Image (spheres, rainbow, N blue to C red):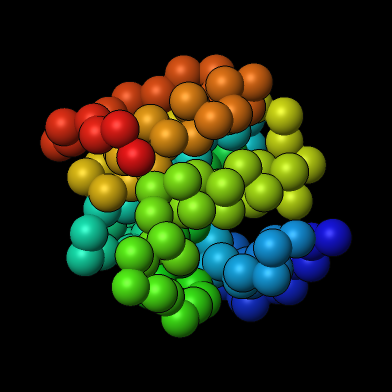
């Protein structure tokens, strides 16, 4: 079961609201959401957070519902303890977070843009949950198997 809490207006991105979304796996992601229209999920790279998209997000929000999560371990999202294999921070674990976020927001399919680490997470999301991905754009990535 997911839980969404309103965290007020973003002080950095005009027209965007901040949410704390607790996923069914217990991870809480901080998410900025703005605009109306088809959902466009934007996944930041390392070592950034959702503010990496602050210059372009308001323009995109004129046509899309723009969704800007902080990936687990980044920004104001949860930072779970990891093990020696770092599985808590694998691309698969992060992609599962995003899959659960899509569900929590009541969406069925999204377009996404991913940069660096976010592109790898988007790639994994498309492999593991193709039914949730309408299309994807990969920026500055060399896809890997994990």
* Residue ID at (23%, 31%): 143
- Viewer-side residue, 1 vs 11: 1
Based on the displayed image, in which of its 4 quarters is residue 108 positioned?
Answer: top right
**Residue 91 pos. (x, y %):** 39, 48
Seen as rendered, the residue at the extreme right is: 1
From this viewpoint, is residue 95 visible?
yes
* Residue ID at (40%, 74%): 83
Q: Is residue 50 left or right of residue 37?
A: left
52 over 145 or under it: above or below? below
**Residue 135 pos. (x, y %):** 46, 18
From this viewpoint, is residue 63 visible?
no
Seen as rendered, the residue at the extreme front is: 84
Q: Is residue 104 left or right of residue 20?
A: right
* Residue ID at (57%, 21%): 130
41 over 15 or under it: above or below? above
Based on the displayed image, in which of its 4 quarters is residue 106 positioned?
Answer: top right
- Viewer-side residue, 25 vs 35: 25
Looking at the rendered structure, the number of numbered marks drawn on it comes to: 0
Based on the displayed image, in which of its 4 quarters is residue 110 positioned?
Answer: top right
**Residue 5 pos. (x, y %):** 73, 73
**Residue 99 pos. (x, y %):** 61, 42
């Amino acid at each position: 079961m997911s839980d969404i809490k309103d965290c007020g207006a973003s002080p950095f991105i005009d027209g965007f609201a901040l949410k704390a979304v607790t996923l069914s796996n217990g991870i809480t992601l901080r998410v900025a959401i703005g605009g109306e229209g088809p959902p466009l999920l934007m996944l930041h790279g390392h070592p950034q957070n959702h503010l990496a998209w602050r210059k372009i997000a308001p323009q995109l929000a004129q046509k899309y519902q723009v969704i800007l999560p902080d990936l687990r371990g980044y920004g104001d999202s949860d930072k779970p303890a990891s093990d020696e294999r770092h599985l808590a921070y694998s691309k698969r674990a992060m992609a599962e977070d995003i899959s659960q976020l899509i569900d929590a927001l009541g969406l069925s399919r999204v377009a996404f843009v991913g940069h660096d680490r976010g592109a790898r997470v988007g790639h994994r999301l498309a492999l593991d949950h193709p039914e949730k991905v309408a299309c994807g754009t990969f920026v500055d990535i060399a896809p890997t198997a994990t």
